Image (cartoon, rainbow, N blue to C red):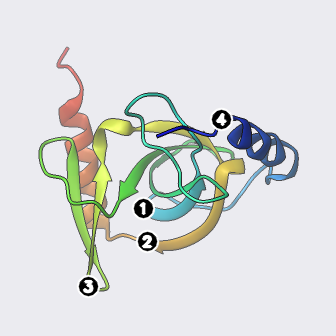
């Protein structure tokens, strides 16, 4: 499949100039996020806005957060965590943790439970090498 880096670059420039400088958001929230067109097996965004749902795993300030991309494609294993909501199954892609600017955030979707957030945090920690 051919990736349209030129269109993504145009959209990224628009986000840089029109996206919010700061945003009120919280850990545990799921947002539509313009994560863009990426390289290799990195998760890409979909549609004209290059969006994908992401889970805010760690908020650093009102401008930056660590997020985990989500998918509706069923995947299993230590690099994935399954969530169910409203009769649908979503997969949090633990291996693709990334830092994003709130300029990429588009629309709030929902908030996950504190318990689910804790489970996901522990799974992410489990992927890190032991000191």
Residue wearing tag 4: 5
Q: Earlier in the sequence, mark 1 or mark 4?
A: 4
Q: Is residue 113 toward the left or the right of residue 49 in the image?
A: left
Percent coordinates x, y for residue 114 in the rendering:
31, 66
| Residue 87: numbered disc | 3
Which callout, 2 or 3, points to the residue nearer the camera?
A: 3
Q: Earlier in the sequence, mark 1 or mark 2?
A: 1
Q: For mark 2, what is the residue?
A: 111
Which residue lies at the image location 19% right of the left edge and 53% below the top edge?
Answer: 75
- Measured in 3D between alpha carbons, the distance from the residue under mark 1 to the one under mark 2, in whole angstroms, is 5 Å
User: Which circle's residue, 4 or 3, is located before the other in the chain?
Assistant: 4
Question: Where is residue 112 drawn, in percent x and y?
Answer: 36, 69
Badge 2: residue crowd in 10 Å (few <14, some 14–19, many ≥20):
some
CB under 8 Å between discs 1 and 2: yes
x and y percentages locating residue 30 in the rendered image: 47, 64
Per the rendering, the mark at residue 99 is none
Residue at the top extreme?
Answer: 131
Tell which circle, 4 or 2, labels the residue nearer the N-terminal end.
Answer: 4
């Amino acid at each position: 499949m051919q990736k349209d880096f030129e269109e993504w670059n145009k959209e990224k420039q628009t986000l840089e100039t029109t996206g919010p400088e700061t945003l009120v958001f919280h850990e545990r929230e799921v947002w539509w996020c313009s994560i863009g067109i990426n390289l290799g097996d990195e998760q890409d965004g979909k549609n004209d806005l290059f969006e994908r749902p992401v889970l805010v795993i760690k908020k650093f300030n009102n401008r930056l957060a660590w997020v985990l991309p989500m998918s509706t494609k069923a995947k299993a294993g230590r690099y994935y965590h399954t969530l169910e909501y409203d009769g649908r199954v979503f997969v949090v892609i633990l291996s693709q943790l990334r830092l994003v600017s709130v300029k990429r955030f588009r629309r709030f979707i929902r908030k996950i439970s504190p318990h689910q957030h804790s489970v996901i945090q522990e799974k992410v920690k489990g992927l890190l090498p032991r000191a």
